Each structure stands twice: as structure tokens, then as C-alpha cells.
Image (tube, rainbow, N blue to C red):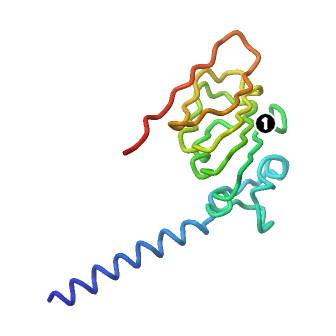
Amino acid sequence: MKRTILFLALGFASLATWAQNAQKDTVFIKITDDNVFSRCFTKCDLNGDQMVSYAEAEKATALGLDYGGRKNIISNYDFLKYFPNLTHLSIGNTPNETIDLSGNPKLEVIDLRGGLWINEVTLAAGCSPQIFFPIHDQPVTFKRVPPTR
């Protein structure tokens, strides 16, 4: 009985590890508009397959999401949490008023000049990037996520 339980536990542990590794190679960004992909995500696409996998996103250090004018409006930035090693980020035209960058603790430069509606940005604890602000009368508020123990 103990042996059966041990084998089941080991089986579940190895299955969880396999699932975690499979997720890293899974594609999470597939953009059909070639203009958006080529201007924003080409440098992340390390194998040139026109898709960005979790593993490729993890290796990316710079991301420019401010190209393409009004056509390329991004309204959901939740995918940025899959880019934990970003040091440079540019955000362009967006209807969002808040942006959560708490999953990007290595940011050194954030360019918000194209994000005219942004008025609140959440940063990771200990993250103190150089910030280029949008040109508008509304001040931008910065919050920090408390460090985890």
C-alpha cells in the first residue's frame, strides 16, 4: 500500500514538472497582423516562427509597444507578466488608465509618452526605473507592490 502511494505521488510530481516545462514552450502570443508583430514582437521571436512562446518571452529584455500609431491599440497588458526580464519598455497608444508592471522587477526604463490616458502604474517592489511621462496635464501615480516574504 505504501509503495502504491509512493508511486502515485512520484507520478503526480513528474506530471506536474512535465506540464510546467510544456507550458514554457507553449505559444502564448500569436498575432495575425504582420504589421503589429513585426513592429512590436520580432525581437522576442528567437526562432522566427512568427509566434512568441513563454520561453522566448522570458528571455526578452526590451519591448516596444508604441509602434504603428492608432491602429495598434493594445487594451490588455496582462501578458507583460510573462516578460520578467524586461529592462526597457515602451507603451504606446492605449485606452487604459492603469498599467500593472509588478511582474517586471528588472525594469530600468519605462517610456509612457505614447500612453496619454495612463494615470496609474503599479511597479514591483524595489523597482526604480527611469520614466518618460506622457505629455498631458494629468499626473501619473505610481504604486509599488509590497515585497513577498
Q: Is residue 144 left or right of residue 38?
A: left
Q: Quadrant of the C terminus?
A: top left
Identity of the residue drawn at 70% across and 54% down: 60
Q: From the top left corner, tell me how far across and down residue 99 is, in percent.
A: 59, 32
Q: From the top left corner, tell me how far across and down residue 16 is, in percent.
A: 41, 72
Residue ID for mark 1: 66
Q: Tag 1, which secondary structure?
A: loop
| Res 129 → quadrant | top right
User: In the picture shown, does residue 125 fall above or below 9?
Assistant: above
Q: From the top left corner, tell me how far across and down residue 46 is, in percent.
A: 77, 64
Q: Amino acid at mark 1?
A: Asp
Identity of the residue drawn at 73% across and 13% down: 136
User: In the picture shown, does residue 73 fall above or below 31?
Assistant: above
Q: Residue furthest left?
A: 1
Identity of the residue drawn at 71% across and 36% down: 109
| Res 65 → quadrant | top right
Identity of the residue drawn at 68% across and 61% down: 56
Q: Is residue 148 left or right of residue 91?
A: left
| Res 43 → quadrant | bottom right
Q: Quadrant of the N terminus?
A: bottom left
Q: From the top left corner, tell me how far across and down residue 58 is, in percent.
A: 63, 58
